């Protein structure tokens, strides 16, 4: 139940007092002495206060109200998310991008959402030739910069994603790699740059998300945010940006002490970047998961895997094949939990719980042929319980019995 002070605020808010509406919205947003946190109710009162011109109200909406709360109240709250996004509040930009992706049933609402994500400048009719004229002038070495900027802006307002990217980079005074570009005209405007880059990114340009990640880590940006930078970087990496994939991989590897499976994420992104020709990513991969030796102990045993052995000892035969395929040690081959180890792009070889002298390591799945053979082996182990194979001694005894003493000594 509300205390005496909170009751005064509630009465003032209900009577239409803007300051009381703001105070009540903050109480429900952050929780009061007696009032619990209630995001939908907070949004209601903050919208009421914003309607009366309280600037702090729409700033709080943009910075704190999540998409799940904003979507049901979009008709009431949309304009305040637009206002906050125009001021470069990162959370508001993200919510508007999510609103753009939804497809609510009222057609008018969809148009309203799309209009909200557009920049807050008058949308005038753009000649269909504006993008072509901008591209033609862009190719000229001695182009008039003022005319170039005018055409680029017109093309961006018309929805051309390349123009939106170019305009965003121009406003941020940077190139597509995030490096600073000196310009004699105008000043840096990161907030406007983010608006244009967000539009280009929503239209599928990975370079735009990468550029946004560079802006969010700029120390001179008033709304610097490492979390927003990482979110934009991962979005660019998901879209196939090689530089973003390299950075995501290196960042995950450096953070592996915080979460052990970060090394798996690191290898995933580094493999993606290396596949696009990144030498730095390939070097990092070679350090994390060194290439396997040319031969292993299990190679001479493969010809001995007759049909009789495959039928009588299918799990043992599969482990020998796995050892030959990925150059596992004998202990690793016998003790590996094959189903848990398979991460799609790599194997997590971790037998420390059963074999204390071992170390956790990653083995890359490098080719489609390796992936196909691993899938077949994993399907075999999915059909059995791990306890059926016994402990390490029992598995080793079974291997020795099958091989014989002489062959075992050679292996």
Image (tube, rainbow, N blue to C red):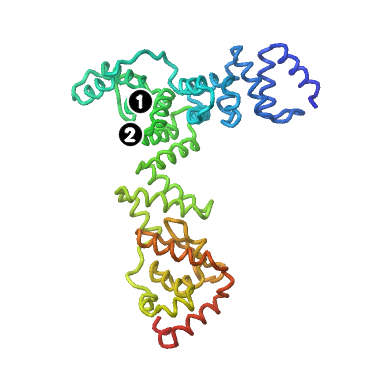
Vertical placement of residue 254 versus 359, above or below? above
Left or right relative to 166: residue 87: right
Left or right relative to 38: residue 355: left
Quadrant hosting residue 169: top left
Q: Residue tagged by mark 1?
A: 164
Left or right relative to 202: residue 398: right
The quarter of the image holding the N terminus is top right
The quarter of the image holding the C terminus is bottom left
Asked whether 296 or 54 is in front, the reply is 296
Q: Secondary structure at mark 2?
A: loop
Q: Residue at x 35, y 22 (%)?
A: 156
Of pointers 1 and 2, the one earlier in the residue sequence: 1
Q: Residue at x 63, y 20 (%)?
A: 46
Number of marks drawn: 2
Quadrant hosting residue 78: top right
What percent of the width, then of the height, locates residue 378? 47, 64
Q: Residue tagged by mark 2?
A: 176
Q: Residue at x 40, y 66 (%)?
A: 326
What percent of the width, then of the height, locates residue 407? 40, 85
CA gap between label 1 and label 2 equals 13 Å
How many residues crowd mark 1 within 10 Å: few (<14), some (14–19), many (20+)? many
What percent of the width, then of the height, locates residue 17? 69, 12
Vertical placement of residue 410 versus 237, above or below? below
Vertical placement of residue 55 versus 318, above or below? above
Asked whether 395 or 183 is in front, the reply is 395
What percent of the width, then of the height, locates residue 348? 47, 61
């Amino acid at each position: 139940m509300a205390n005496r002070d909170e009751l005064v605020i509630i009465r003032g808010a209900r009577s239409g007092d803007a300051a009381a509406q703001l105070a009540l919205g903050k109480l429900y947003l952050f929780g009061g002495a007696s009032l619990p946190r209630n995001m939908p109710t907070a949004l209601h009162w903050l919208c009421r206060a914003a309607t009366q011109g309280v600037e702090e109200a729409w700033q709080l909406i943009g910075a704190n109200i999540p998409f799940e709360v904003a979507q049901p109240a979009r008709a009431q709250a949309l304009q305040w998310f637009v206002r906050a996004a125009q001021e470069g509040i990162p959370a508001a930009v993200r919510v508007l991008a999510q609103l753009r992706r939804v497809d609510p049933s009222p057609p008018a609402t969809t148009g309203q959402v799309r209009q909200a994500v557009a920049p807050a400048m008058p949308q005038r009719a753009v000649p269909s030739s504006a993008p072509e004229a901008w591209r033609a002038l862009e190719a000229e070495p001695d182009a008039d910069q003022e005319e170039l900027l005018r055409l680029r802006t017109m093309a961006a307002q018309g929805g051309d994603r390349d123009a939106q990217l170019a305009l965003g980079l121009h406003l941020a005074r940077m190139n597509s790699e995030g490096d600073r570009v000196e310009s004699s005209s105008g000043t840096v405007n990161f907030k406007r740059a983010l608006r244009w880059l967000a539009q280009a990114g929503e239209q599928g340009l990975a370079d735009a998300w990468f550029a946004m990640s560079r802006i969010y880590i700029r120390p001179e940006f008033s709304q610097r945010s490492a979390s927003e930078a990482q979110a934009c970087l991962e979005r660019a990496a998901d879209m196939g940006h090689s530089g973003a994939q390299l950075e995501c991989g290196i960042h995950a590897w450096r953070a592996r002490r915080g979460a052990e499976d970060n090394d798996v994420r690191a290898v995933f992104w580094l493999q993606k970047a290396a596949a696009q020709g990144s030498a730095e990513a390939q070097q990092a991969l070679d350090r994390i998961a060194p290439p396997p030796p040319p031969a292993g102990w299990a190679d001479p045993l493969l010809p001995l895997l007759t049909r009789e052995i495959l039928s009588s000892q299918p799990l043992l035969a599969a482990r020998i094949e796995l050892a030959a395929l990925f150059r596992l040690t004998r202990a690793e081959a016998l003790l590996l939990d094959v189903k848990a180890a398979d991460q799609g792009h790599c194997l997590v070889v971790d037998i420390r719980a059963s074999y204390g002298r071992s170390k956790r390591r990653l083995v890359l799945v490098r080719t489609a042929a390796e992936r196909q053979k691993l899938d077949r082996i994993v399907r075999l182990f999915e059909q059995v319980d791990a306890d059926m194979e016994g402990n390490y001694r029992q598995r080793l005894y079974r291997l020795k019995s099958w091989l014989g003493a002489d062959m075992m000594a050679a292996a």
